[in-house]
Image: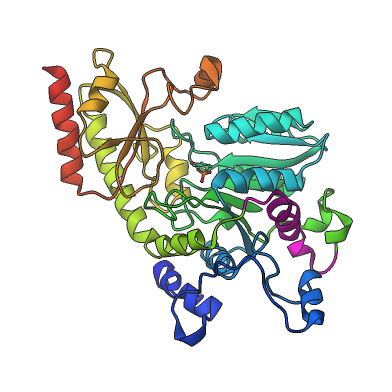
């Protein structure tokens, strides 16, 4: 299937990669926590990693393995570990790979909960530099001999800053630093992580991949570009066999097994169903977002639109290169001062006021008072988040219905 298109590969991936029994086209979902072995030698071999198999469903199960194979194949990575949520993937991975005294460089425009978790890491003795990832020099200036990881998102939420991923990836490769990219906003249909030398990608499957607002999940994928024999924090126990697998093994053992944020098998199955239509939904979300952003950019009640698809956006040309001519499904707005933003949101009908993003439905949220409330005014300013900024996650509705919903909302707040 390697030479087939993105969606052809995906809709056949479960069948082709995982060979379910009886000609089933989906891998089975087992609710068994334990797995019986007729021969104890086999059980021992599986425990010791000499043979593939499941021993306890906190560590692995058939539907999780099936989903991991599909996700790694989609992304072009060498392997994947799934977790119960995107936050679990991020926190378990960083805990598994970092030690006290290490230094990491992270984007100053992070998703709020990731940022909050990174400040917890600081309390565990990890040094953190928050930098402007639109500028590779800002990253380069912070890298020292203790730097283990550079972590950034592709397109930031809500102000849509686009990281200079190719330049940062090159820098990390030169400096032998792990480059970890959160590509929740731009799943691999839009974005080739290998092209920017990403060592690992992490993402919330809850968003575009599952896509329907009905299941939580997260994943870590190793892109196979990093030489783990040079990483100082691999436990001796895991330094055996092919070094390409060392990172994944440590994340699987120290991250998933020991921290225990396992993706339920039924969730893994649901996510794999969402995955099949990822490209169709992404095309529609990106197209709708560009049309809406363009319409709003020209509206006299709108002071500013934040969307990489607009040529005024400071990283428009970087985004065009990175995301295959698409610009994602998220944009934000500042309305003119005379509009009461809460009243405006209350007037929208098709557009739902809700937290979350990457859904089939269009969602709106005032960000400073909700998801970025906890980080405080100073941090919000650094992230370019104004007090009345509104974020929109554009869904797959018919574009005319979305535009007319905005139009009637503008009308009713103007009269
Ligand atoms: C939502 C999100 C997460 C966290 O994912 P959950 O599945 O909600 O835990 C991490 N990173 C980004 C960029 C996100 O948008």
Residue 361 image offset from top left, x and y in percent: 30, 46
**Any part of residue 134 in sight:** no
Q: In this view, does 54 lie above or below 302?
A: below
Q: In which quarter of the image is the C terminus?
A: top left
**Magenta span main SS:** helix
**Which residue appears at 46% of the width and 59% of the height?**
271
As drawn, which residue projects farthest toward the left?
415
Q: What stretch is highlighted in magenta?
A: 240-261
Return the residue nearer the eye: 398 or 136: 398
Residue 145 image offset from top left, x and y in percent: 83, 38
Looking at the rendered structure, the number of numbered marks drawn on it comes to 0
Return the residue nearer the eye: 381 or 172: 381
Return the residue nearer the eye: 201 or 24: 24
Q: Is residue 251 above or below residue 67?
A: above
**Any part of residue 67 in sight:** yes
Residue 92 highlighted magenta (yes or no): no
As drawn, which residue projects farthest toward the bottom?
22
Return the residue nearer the eye: 265 or 87: 265
Residue 408 image offset from top left, x and y in percent: 13, 30
Residue 151 image offset from top left, x and y in percent: 64, 41
Residue 244 highlighted magenta (yes or no): yes
**Which residue appears at 36% of the width and 52% of the height?**
212
Q: Is 25 left, or right, of 202 in this rendering?
A: left
As drawn, which residue projects farthest toward the top?
338
**Which residue appears at 77% of the width and 58% of the height?**
227
Q: Is residue 351 above or below residue 34?
A: above
**Which residue appears at 71% of the width and 58% of the height?**
252
Q: Is 14 left, or right, of 41 in this rendering?
A: left
Q: Is 373 left, or right, of 278 in this rendering?
A: right
């Amino acid at each position: 299937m390697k030479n087939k298109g993105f969606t052809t590969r995906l809709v056949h991936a479960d069948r082709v990669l995982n060979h379910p029994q009886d000609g089933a086209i989906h891998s089975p979902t087992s609710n068994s926590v334990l797995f019986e072995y007729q021969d104890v030698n086999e059980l021992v071999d599986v425990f010791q990693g000499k043979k593939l198999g499941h021993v306890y469903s906190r560590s692995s199960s058939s539907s999780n393995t099936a989903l991991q194979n599909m996700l790694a194949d989609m992304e072009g990575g060498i392997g994947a570990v799934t977790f119960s949520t995107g936050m679990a993937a991020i926190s378990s991975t960083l805990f598994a790979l970092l030690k006290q005294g290490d230094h990491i460089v992270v984007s100053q425009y992070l998703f709020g909960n990731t940022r909050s978790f990174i400040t917890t890491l600081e309390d565990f003795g990890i040094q953190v530099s928050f930098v402007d990832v639109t500028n590779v020099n800002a990253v380069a200036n912070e890298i020292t001999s203790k730097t283990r990881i550079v972590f950034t998102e592709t397109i930031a939420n809500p102000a849509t800053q686009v990281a200079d991923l190719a330049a940062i990836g090159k820098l990390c490769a030169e400096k032998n630093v792990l480059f970890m990219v959160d590509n929740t906003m731009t799943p691999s249909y839009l974005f080739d992580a290998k092209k920017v030398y990403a060592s690992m990608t992490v993402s919330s499957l809850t968003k575009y991949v599952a896509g329907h607002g009905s299941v939580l999940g997260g994943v870590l994928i190793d892109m196979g570009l990093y030489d783990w024999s040079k990483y100082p924090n691999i436990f001796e126990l895991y330094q055996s066999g092919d070094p390409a697998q060392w990172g994944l093994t440590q994340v699987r053992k120290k991250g998933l097994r020991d921290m225990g944020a396992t993706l339920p098998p039924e969730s893994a199955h649901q996510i794999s169903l969402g995955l099949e239509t990822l490209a169709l939904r992404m095309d529609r979300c990106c197209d709708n977002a560009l049309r809406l952003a363009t319409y709003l950019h020209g509206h006299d009640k709108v002071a500013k639109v934040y969307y990489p698809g607009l040529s005024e956006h400071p990283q428009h040309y970087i985004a065009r290169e990175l995301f295959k001519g698409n610009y994602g499904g998220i944009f934000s707005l500042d309305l003119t001062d005379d509009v009461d933003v809460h009243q405006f949101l209350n007037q929208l009908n098709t557009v739902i006021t809700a937290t979350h993003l990457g859904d089939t439905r269009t969602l709106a949220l005032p960000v400073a008072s909700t998801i970025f409330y906890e980080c405080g005014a100073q941090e919000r300013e650094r992230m370019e988040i104004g007090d009345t900024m509104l974020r929109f996650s554009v869904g797959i509705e018919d574009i005319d219905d979305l535009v007319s919903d905005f139009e009637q909302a503008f009308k009713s707040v103007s009269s």
